């Protein structure tokens, strides 16, 4: 089945540690996105990539980094510079034609202890 | 002014009633409009999208778009308890490089 796989589903981190969230898709989509969601809030764009080896900052990129070495993979690193990293992180990809709809992974919930 | 605004709710309707969810947006260059449903602790899933002024129906769901008023709504007919979720409105504007901007979501509760 085609889809987006995010891991881990739950992650606990101590302050000062970097963590990397995995996002893999087998939909053959060119564009991939990382969003952050806080309780009672909408989704805010962290980073996005429209093609391999290229990515752009979204609205809240500070304290985060990404890479796009393969079409299928778009990992997100939450660095120690991110002041308030506890949140629900959602990876998405966008189809190459048609309605250009975003499809989301199941999400990763990060808690900083 | 937020780029995409929704009433956060909660909106409570009885089972079988029509639920009406509203969304306004600020960018007149917006061209694509999406409604996502998000159950608690889960990721958003697409309900429907609309590009043109007017109504678009899909089963119990109807999306309504009025670009002159910068307003998009989602009607849910014959609401069911399983419709209880947060509904996210999202707007794509090519003036902003095609980014998808989300509202904060409206929580809907359908009471049996």
Image (cartoon, rainbow, N blue to C red):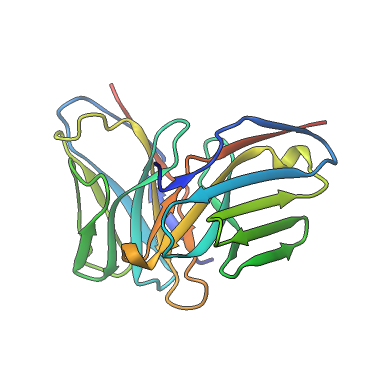
Query: Can residue A22 be seen here?
Result: yes
The part of the image, by quadrant, that contains residue A15 is: top left
Q: Residue at x 47, y 48 (%)?
A: A106
Above or below, A111 relative to B96: above
Residue at image location 31% in from the left, 51% down from the top = A22
Outermost residue on the bottom side: it is: A97
Which is nearer the eye, A65 or B65? B65
For the residue pair B2 and A44, the one nearer the viewer reads as B2
Which residue sits furthest top?
A113
In the image, B105: left or right of B109? left
Spot occupied by residue B31 in the image (x, y as percentages of width and height): 48, 67
Numbered circles on residues, count:
0
Which residue is located at x 17 percent, y 40 percent? A63
Query: Which x, y percent locates residue A12?
Result: 31, 29
Q: Which image quadrant: the C terminus of chain B?
A: top right
Q: Vertically, is A99 above or below A12?
A: below
Left or right, residue B24 beside residue B83: left
**Does A55 sit left or right of B34 as displayed?**
left
Q: Position of residue A61 (x, y in %)?
A: 22, 47
Image: A2 above or below B104: below
Q: Residue furthest front?
A: B68
Please tell me whether residue A49 is drawn above or below residue B44 in the rendered image. below
> Residue A101's spot in the image, x, y percent?
49, 65
Q: Quadrant of the N terminus of chain B?
A: top left
Q: Is residue A110 visible?
A: no
């Amino acid at each position: 089945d085609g889809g987006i796989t995010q891991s881990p589903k739950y992650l606990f981190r101590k302050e000062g540690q970097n963590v990397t969230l995995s996002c893999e898709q087998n939909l053959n989509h060119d564009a991939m996105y990382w969003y952050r969601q806080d309780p009672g809030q909408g989704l805010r764009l962290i980073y996005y990539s429209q093609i391999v080896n290229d990515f752009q900052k979204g609205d809240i990129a500070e304290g985060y980094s990404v890479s796009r070495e393969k079409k299928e993979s778009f990992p997100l690193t939450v660095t120690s510079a991110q002041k308030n990293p506890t949140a629900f992180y959602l990876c998405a990809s966008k189809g190459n034609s048609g309605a250009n709809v975003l499809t989301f992974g199941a999400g990763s919930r990060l808690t900083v202890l | 002014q937020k780029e995409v605004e929704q009433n956060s709710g909660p909106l409570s309707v009885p089972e079988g009633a029509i639920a009406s969810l509203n969304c306004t947006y600020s960018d007149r260059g917006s061209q694509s409009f999406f409604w996502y449903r998000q159950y608690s602790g889960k990721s958003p899933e697409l309900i429907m999208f609309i590009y043109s002024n007017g109504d678009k129906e899909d089963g119990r769901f109807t999306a309504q778009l009025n670009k002159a008023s910068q307003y998009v709504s989602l009607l849910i007919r014959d609401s069911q308890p399983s419709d209880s979720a947060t509904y996210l409105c999202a707007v794509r504007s090519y003036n902003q490089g095609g980014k998808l901007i989300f509202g904060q979501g409206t929580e809907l509760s359908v009471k049996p």
